[in-house]
Amino acid sequence: MTAKEYLQQLERADVIIEQKMKEQADLEELSKCVRAIDYGKDRVSSSGTGDAPFVNPVLKIVMLEQEINAEIDKYVDLKRKITGEIQSLQDPQFIKVLFKRYVEYKGFDKIAVELECSERNVYTIHGQALKDFTEKVLKM
């Protein structure tokens, strides 16, 4: 795993949490809907669960909420770990660029504005910072 892939784990974890939260919101909306009965079909005797129609989505919501909480716990731990590893570097410019890029998810253009330097310079610092991160953190 390269330094870049390693650092991108944080954003991937964040995306997964966002998607699960969206799924949860969709399920919550679905659980509020009442389904209509189709009287046009012939009635067939079947043994149902006896549960109200909203019970299954509510159970899914509870299970998904537990998954989201577990993902958030992992995300917080990973963020703390990666932030500490970035801050263990010696060069303040490396720390700033890697933190803004991989913890704050900022683009190179925004980083350049914040650091008051050219975007090309940010790319150069980023490349050097990744090399330093690989040597000092990943090869330990």
Image: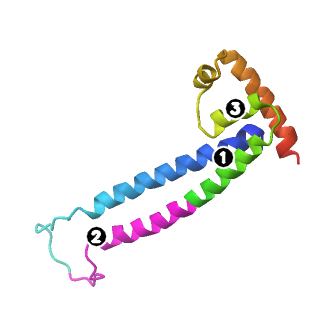
Q: Which tag is nearer the camera, tag 2 or tag 3? A: 3
Tell me residue 117's x, y (percent): 67, 16
Q: Specify whether residue 50 is painted magenta.
A: yes
Magenta stretch bounds: 45-71
Mark 3 residue type: Lys
Q: Which tag is nearer the camera, tag 1 or tag 2? A: 1
Tell me residue 81's x, y (percent): 71, 51
The residue located at (63%, 40%) in the rendering is 103
**What is the spatial separation of the Cα atoms under label 2 and label 3, in whole angstroms?**
49 Å
**Taken as a whole, is the magenta stretch helix, strand or loop?**
helix
Q: Count the labels in the image.
A: 3
- Answer with left or right where residue 91 lies relative to residue 36: right
Q: Which residue is mark 2?
A: 54
Mark 2 residue type: Phe
Specify the farthest residue to the left.
39
The residue located at (83%, 39%) in the rendering is 134
Q: Which residue is mark 3?
A: 96
Question: Sequence-wise, which precedes: disc 1 or disc 3?
Answer: 1
Question: Which numbered circle lies on residue 9?
Answer: 1
Question: Sequence-wise, which precedes: disc 2 or disc 3?
Answer: 2
* Nearest to the observer: residue 96 or residue 45: 96
Tell me residue 52's x, y (percent): 25, 76
